[in-house]
Amino acid sequence: MTPHRPSDDDAHTTLEEAFEAADDVPTNPELSDTIGAVIARRYGRREVLQGALGVGVVTALFGPAALTAPAAAGAKPAFAFDELAAGVDETHHVADGYEAHVLIRWGDPVLADAPAFDPRAQTADAQRKQFGYNNDYIAFFPLDETGTRGLLAVNHEYVSSEVMFPGLGGRPDKSDFVKITKEIAEVQMAAHGVSIVEIALENARWRTVPAGRYNRRIDAASTVMTVSGPAAGHARLKTTADATGTRLVGTLNNCAGGQTPWGTYLTGEENFHGYFWTDQKDEKGKRRTRGLGGPQRKSYDRYGVPGNWYNWGQHDARFNVDREPNEPNRFGWIVEIDPADPTSTPVKHTALGRFRHEGAEVIVNTDGRVVVYSGDDARFDYLYRFVSKGTYRPGDKAANMTLLREGTLSAARFNDDGTLSWLPLVHGQGPLTRENGFESQADVTIDARLAADLLKATPMDRPEDVQPHPGNGKVWVMLTNNSLRKPSQIDKANPRADNRFGHIIEMTAPGANHAADTFTWEIFIKCGDPKLAAVGAQWHPETSASGWFAAPDNCAIDARGRLWIATDRGGNWPRTGTTDGIYALETEGERRGLSKLFFRVPVGAEMCGPCFTPDDETLFVAVQHPAVDGVKNYKPFGRASTFEDPATRWPDFKPDMPPRPAIVAIRKTGGGKIA
């Protein structure tokens, strides 16, 4: 089955919760050997299920040092801060000794001629000049050697209409989007995409430069882009407005991303399928989500097109698959943007494959080639790697900006013996032939999911950020959750039924060669409350009640090579008793596997980002959709949020302002490196 548009009787009170539930239905039919099955075979079902960490399992997970808790107790922690207490309320919190200041909010000016923000009189023209909604991934680009000036590039993933627009109530889709007018839809489109904002450090505090010459807004409706790689100009990318298949308009559902060594920004288009619409309805009068697309029916169904999450297709033919059946093929890519040139044309790189991209983390390999890791953020989908054909040339930006046009895309197969095989998605090799529906490499990249299905890649539990360490060959994979795992699958399908907590896998590239055909892997963390044996969580034994987390999502590595995790519990945060946050996670030595809470968001928000300045003296984080997720279960509030009646009015706390997604800059009080 494919994702469905939330119906009137769905037990969800916000679009976010409904969309999350829609994606509970996987589109991958190839579920014979999931990552859970591999983990269960490798470590043993009984130990995994009961959380009974015997000597062999503990050693396999954390190394011999994890068995010496007394020695660990006397060791100096790598992260030098007093842990923040977990909890939930209407504002954000940071560890003692640190200051967290709101840097920029939805509606704040980006371009010099942006009008003052008026949430009750929004227009698309104004929003295209203002900071967009639901900020997610962040990248920082220094503008000088002092590190006091720089550019922030920020993704804007989607919109939370019920708290964004007045008069919609808690479920703007309840009457089949009747309240979402063309004018509102156009504002929604303008609020998507990317903001590039110049910032400066003044008196130990970061501030935006509203008239900065680099400032730019990139959106879903008006930004013209080009395309590179095997699918550029292919017939499946051609539309009524673009007979060449090379002039693409807009980017949307920009979730995580990456930075290149040559100074450009990569943004991943994730849940693009939800934006496409059909006028066709089934026998029950519900808008169809399957069996459309004509000759592309198999592709549509595998990608969940159309999702019917937004009604843009009622107002813009581009998003109506009945009228423009190829438009969905123009989304789901990695987009490269040059933040140093606000007149440059963004490029969608088809060689990196089309799927629900979560991140595009980049590393220069030992042989000079560029490697990009990305997860397909859906239950039972895959982990991917791209290796460029050409090599990186220090100082030659123009040449380096061609590196993502050509290379080898692979999907991961996790083997029972602790090895990982990278399976090249190359037309003509193995089953990727005309007989199986692949006429060329363009078809392979457009339908990367279908290609990976045939190669028997390992279905994963929502692979999100995939972060390579800059020096030691380690790569950490954030696996957020998979609530679809059933007890009947436990024996070999996966380690935990109803996995709402997620886990982290550590991969190792041999000799730090990220282009190697075979890696090794092990479970690093199994998330959840370690006090509950039934959860089967696996942490360092000294992890506190505030330090454990669930649903790892974004992550970052600071200049000292240390791992920081952002979580996304969604509407399930009441199960854990705390909001999402930033956690410092030890990866080496005696405290490997020890996690500490550093920052947490206001009620109903998701934690995104994070991003460090090169000197490690500032941590930028993104607070997304405050007042939205799970607020019915927040006892002081106890109902769904609306524009007029939100669970929190963070960060302004003014009666005339709704909650606003925002970027927060965290610095140590008095200066110095973080943690």
Image (tube, rainbow, N blue to C red):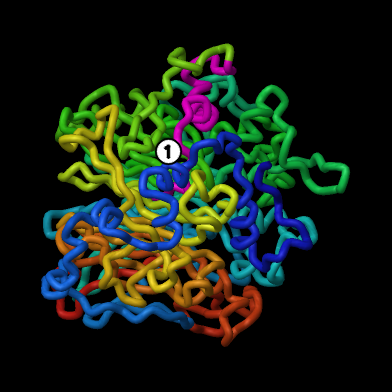
Mark 1 closeness class: few <14, some 14–19, many ≥20 residues within 10 Å:
many
Which residue does the numbered mark 1 point to in the structure image? Answer: 334
Query: Residue 240 in magenta?
Result: no
Dividing the picture into quarters, in which one does residue 137 lie? bottom left
- Which residue is located at x 59 percent, y 23 percent? 236
Residue 72, position as x, y percentages in the image? 15, 69
The N terminus lies in quadrant: top right
Amino acid on which disc 1 is placed: Ile
- Which residue is located at x 70 percent, y 29 percent? 293
Question: For the residue labelled by badge 1, is the local secondary structure a helix, a strand or a loop?
Answer: strand
Residue 234, position as x, y percentages in the image? 53, 20
Residue 483, position as x, y percentages in the image? 56, 56
Residue 552 visible, this orientation: yes
- Which residue is located at x 24 percent, y 64 percent? 200
The C terminus lies in quadrant: bottom left
Q: Nearer the viewer, residue 368 or 314?
A: 368
- Which residue is located at x 40 percent, y 62 percent? 51
Q: Nearer the viewer, residue 67 or 643?
A: 67
- Residue 518 located left or right of residue 136: left
Q: Nearer the viewer, residue 504 or 309?
A: 504
- Residue 307 located left or right of residue 340: right
- Residue 278 located left or right of residue 475: right
Which residues fall within the magenta stretch? 436-465
Dividing the picture into quarters, in which one does residue 278 lie? top right
| 367 in relation to 194, above or below | above
Query: Residue 437 in magenta?
Result: yes
- Residue 552 located left or right of residue 371: right
Q: How many marks?
A: 1
Residue 270 visible, this orientation: no
